[in-house]
Amino acid sequence: MFEEKGNISFLGREFLTWLWYKSEERNGTVHLPGTGDVFVQFQKQIILESGEGEYAETVSCRGFHADLAEGKAALREGKKVREARITLGIGSQEWEFTFKADQFQFQSMKLPKTMPLSEEEQDLEPRLLERISLVEEPVQAMERLFEQFLARRLDAVWIEEELPSLRNWMQT
Amino acid sequence: MGFLTGTCTFTKYRIEGEEPISFRDFVDERLKKFAFRELEGASDEKTTGWVGLGNVLDTAFLNAYYSVGDYLAFSLRIDRRSVPAALHKKHVLEAEEKARTMTGRRYLSKGEKTEIKDRVHAVLMSKVMAVPSLFDVCWCVSERWLLLASLTPKVREEFEKLFKRCFELEPVPFVPWTARYLDQELEAKLGRLAPASFV
């Protein structure tokens, strides 16, 4: 199904599919300019889709024993990743969240474990400030990963290097 | 699931529009003006308003404690009440039966049936308790973004309406490929982009 002219919402699914490939290219390590290496791992909970609305065909791989090989088979049928459970590591901290590609949304985000708060710190202000900064960090990282994807997507490197590598990875 | 405990689910917004001078005073006045008020009319199905962060009862916003560092943090409260369809149906059948007995007729007109349905609905609505739900809001004023702890389209719609009316600023859902977040050159390039085939 073709997108309407000017509707570029397909970029969300292309980004998430590319991120899956990128996360496996260097065993989970993706370089993020300005930050360094971040760790990205797709968990066994992934939804792939082709088409839209009543023409949509969806494949869902879920559960601890789900095999992401099924997901790759769906990619080979032309589907792209619509949502996925992702572990993201920055420095020594780790987040886990469901990322919804169509609207760039985050669901059920588990924040890194932090030191237990002292009695004083259990007040609203320090607790909120700490948690909001922990929420901001993965959001900004995902935005920068998208910028990285977009730069490559709009460059000749997409056709020359990125797409052939991604297609090779899909066959593995 | 708000921002203070547990896992976080949220929609990110960019805030557009001109903030008034004395913004903090303006926020204080508006939060209080648009604070949550209990459902008043017997037939009201829904009401919305702001309350203190995670505190369903706090509509006073005393001492500006919603101001946390660079952030403004409060919650959207939405109260809804509805009559379960099965309950409504049962009471309508009873009322229709009573009307037939009283008039001695076997059938009621379409108008009479509609009137009974509406009357029964109004009576039941006046007896039903409203169910409150809270959705945390965290607004980073200096960077003009905001997080709303919900992905649900209906909740987002209520939030966007109330926020716009209250603060006279527009919350725009943040999606990084939206034209308003791109420079002109990038926007033109993206406009020519077609979906890639990965196969």
Image (cartoon, coloured by chain):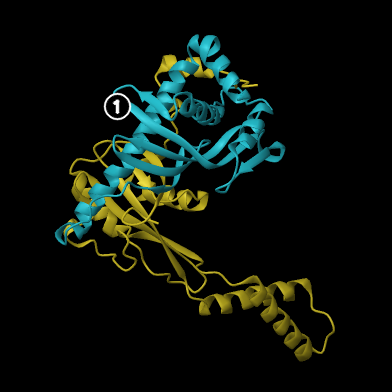
Chain colours: A cyan, B yellow
Q: Residue at x 61, y 72 (%)?
A: B84
Q: Quadrant of the N terminus of chain A?
A: top right
Q: Position of residue B77 (x, y in %)?
A: 39, 61
Left or right of residue A6: residue B102: right
Sort mark 1 into few (<14), some (14-19) or many (20+) by Cα contacts within 10 Å: few
Q: Is residue A44 visible?
A: yes
A33 versus A95 height, above or below? above
Q: Position of residue A7 (x, y in %)?
A: 56, 26
Left or right of residue A63: residue B2: left
Q: Residue furthest right?
A: B106
B72 versus B19 height, above or below? below
B76 versus A96 height, above or below? below
User: In this figure, which residue is indicated by the disc labeled 1?
Assistant: A35
Name the chain under label 1.
A
- Quarter of the image for residue B120 reads bottom right
Q: Amino acid at mark 1?
A: Thr
Q: Residue at x 66, y 40 (%)?
A: A58
Q: Residue at x 76, y 85 (%)?
A: B97
- Quarter of the image for residue B173 reads top left
